[in-house]
Amino acid sequence: MTMNHEKEVIADTGGLSRRDVLKGGTALGVLSVAGFGTQSLAQAAVPSLPMAFRTEVEVAFRINGAQTALALDPRSSLLDVLRDQLGLTGAKKGCDHGQCGACTVHVDGRRVAACMTLAVQVDDLDVTTIEGLAEGDVLHPMQQAFIDHDALQCGYCTPGQIMAGVACVREGHAGSPQQIREYMSGNLCRCGAYPGIVAAIEDAARVMEG
Amino acid sequence: MSRNFYPELVRVDALDKVRGATKFGTDNRPDNLVHGAFAVATIGKGRVISIDTAAAEALPGVVSVITHRNTTSLKPAQFLMGGGFAFQTHSPLLTDHVAYRGQPIALVLAETLEVAIDATAVLQVSYEEQPFAATIDNPLAEPIAQAEAPMRYPLEDISVGDAPAAYEGGAVKVDSTFTMERQFQNPMELIGTVAAWEGDRLTIHEGTQNAGGCKFGVADQLGINPDNVTVISPFIGGGFGQKNSMQSQLVLAAFASRELGRPVKIVVPRRQLFHDATSRPATRQRVRLAANRDGRLVGALYDVDAQTSKLDFFPAEHADTAARFYGYPAFKSFTRLIRTDIPTPGYMRAPFEHATAFAIESAMDELAYKLDMDPIELRLRNDTAVDVVSGLPHSSRHVAECLRRGAETFGWSRRDPTPRSMFAPNGDLIGMGVAIGLYSGSGGPTRARITARRDGAVSLNVGVHEMGQGVLTAITNVVSKRLGIPASAITATVGVTSGVPQPLTAGSWGSASAVPATEAACDALMKALAEAGVDISASLPLGEMVARTGAGQMQVEASSVAPGQELQVLGRTDTGRVAPAGPVYPGFVAFSYAAHFVEVHVEGSTGRIRVPRVVSMFDCGRVLSPRTARSQAIGGVVWGIGGTLREGAETDARYGGVMNGDIAEYLIPVNADIGSIEPGFIDEPDFQVNRSGVKGLGEVVMAGVAPAIINAVYHATGIRVRDLPLRLEALLKPQA
Ligand code: FES
Ligand code: FES
């Protein structure tokens, strides 16, 4: 079922828009759980079943280029779905509260904290994780630059740093070391690999931008 | 001088790490997994009277709820420093006792994490509350002189000469008191366990710095044979001391898994790690220094109050470090432990040395200003080749070299010592500060196994853990050079108890223990080849030598112990115990050293502090892996910046618990906080401390950063800060 009236009730909030969230009726579970649904929408979709009793929602999205469809608890974060259901454990949990960036992945090319993204929000969207960044055995220039600059120690924050770094360059926020530092400050590294991370992103930016 | 004795080797585990392919403990997800989540106590101290689990158990997807009523078969944990394996004596959920706010009181097990978390919120708990003290200033806190505390490994106060009289008679004196709030390690990888049984065999996946301790500890609590336990911890997402022993969730995950007959995963949320894991204890330190007019120290008095819990006496070793900074003719320490109702504090990177350096080296800066003397010159005048405590010589001590080379690299000569005299183009006040730091050169019993195959491949299995410090790279580099084989032919495995024993990796003794054992294994291999009739002097490729024995492969095992240790001490680490030696060895004393030079820019009206530039020089003995050592050094300086300008846990004295218990409010450095950090190494081996010449690096890199920053802030502003973390209001207060 489609909802042509969704624009009237849900404003685009920028970033991952709520309009994206609501593509298709399958995402309805999120409306009641996250609390930004409206009475009229909920009733229009499944008039007989109160939302609070819906425990599974069908979600379909592309993960690292491959189509996937899952029946999900509407409360599931994208991070837990990636890690626990799809076995993509590259994205890490460092806080589960959007505070550390260890879970950074790309949704339609934009960096998001997967722990703060309900999995139902990515319905019909493209999700890329660290596992999908390299082309086969050929590393992405950002991955290579992280090795070259030893921009890691324990490696726990690294997948998130790399995904954020790629997005940072694509956004045009890698113009100077100062700019990189600011735009990478949502990704914590307790090992303190920051100088290497900045150098790696500067380096990779040159390669990515040809 | 030998610089870069070992070549620059690319971090051997970097390729997997940049691909997200490295499996950390809770990345493992066996089939049929059950997820666990804790409900935690909402009182400061007391007793659980009842827990009504009916509503939780009625939720679809909830498998079981475990409370203290179900766990009567489990034995309590024993404190690491009381001869056991755990971070404290107290085991949550084993009794109805609530020792501190945030302690787990129930474990919900469910088909999914979402359901488990949800169910913890519907438990109905009633308590009996008791008065408590969460901070060291609370009237219910219980101070006790450490020398009189009933500790398993007692710590005496230090007394050399008549320090009170020497202090009284000194020409120039400093008497300052320094405080530091509790700090939390916050490794990025959360603490967690995946436990699974196959028959009576238990497999644990957990990021731990002490797989051996976890193996023996969990077996003890469960009452099973440790031979039936395998702990797997090949990569740790940072430990920094918080993962150095058995954590609360381990035995409960194993117990629940056994009860349910299904694998169990528990990942402890960040907020709970601020409430049921270790921290660097809060401290109050008083330093009294007296010197002659020429700058020579005549006496020092050093008093420490260090927080501990009412559960255990966490040893406060601050004085052992303080006494080694300089050649004081007289020195006296007095340490008290302040017992409070918090989880037992523990080891956080440079556990005592960070606080001690802050106090001693800030006081030295105050003394330099009183003497109108350059602070480097003051330090050089008080350098010593002899340990004042034991009277023994230092095996190596390149403090002067660190200071001189650091000053040159930093451009110290450009500094005008007058406070508030230097300005950046934008009007910010510029401050430049210097301080030294030191850390015990420790080592301990370790085993290593080496297997050489006829195709030239070599695999190593060593008792140590890779937590990001780069020990796999160091081992590979050393073996490559020693056996003359390419690094790519070498695979090293660590942190898994099914091979050689895996003792605690901490205290900067990891490489200093593992690398000597590895070198011994290399020697044993060559000896075995020779005994098999191979001419090892013929410089044949290693694979060819193995082939000539007629066997497909050759495997040997070797071990090493620290100087003065008997071989029997291996029995301790073979059973999961801690057995390091140092810094005092028969005939000498060993420490690693650092000299840090810091430039700060302070915005005049807001007091905002920036640290655009740090130069640090290290004397850590032999540098085994230049690339990873550099990263470790940079990381240590980042820790120093965080530990000075950002990190402090704000304890709620009324209700208990940490108010800023997450990593948005407990501030750790972010990328924008960090400027240029330039580390340098003396790279002089110390062959007295071990055959590899390694003194240790991971902790000393942080020691002394705090006072270097504080001294730079004084130089910039004329304001002497004696309380950490340095909050902006300290610079905005009108000065007396
Ligand atoms: S786990 Fe998502 S931001 Fe920390
Ligand atoms: S590399 Fe360890 S947290 Fe960044």
Image (cartoon, grey):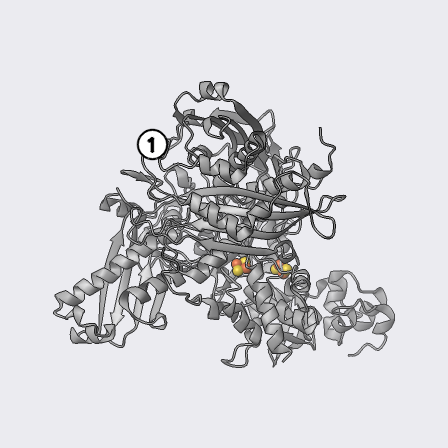
Q: Chain of mark 1?
A: B
Q: Name the one closer to the observer, B455 or A24.
A: B455
Using residue A14 as the reference point, say whether residue B115 is left or right of it: left
In the rendering, at what x and y percent does residue A59 appear? 67, 74
| Amino acid on which the number 1 mark rests in the picture | Ser
Q: Residue at x 77, y 70 (%)?
A: A17
Q: Which image quarter is the C terminus of chain B in?
A: top right
Q: Position of residue B314 (x, y in %)?
A: 46, 35
Secondary structure of residue under mark 1: loop
Q: Residues within 10 Å of mark 1 (few under 14, many from 20)?
A: few
Q: Is residue A115 visible?
A: yes
Q: Which residue is mark 1?
A: B390
Q: Nearer the viewer, residue B520 or B225?
A: B520
- Left or right placement of residue B436 versus residue B511 in this view: right
Tell me what residue is drawn at x 64 percent, y 47 percent.
B600
Q: Which residue appears at 63% of the width and 72% of the height?
A: A166
Asked if B478 appears above or below B553 in the picture, the reply is above
- When the figure is inspected, residue A181 is found, relative to residue B364, above or below; the finding is below
x, y percent for residue B437 = 48, 42
Depth order, front residue of B678/A28? B678
Q: Position of residue A82 (x, y in %)?
A: 59, 69
Q: Is residue B98 visible?
A: no
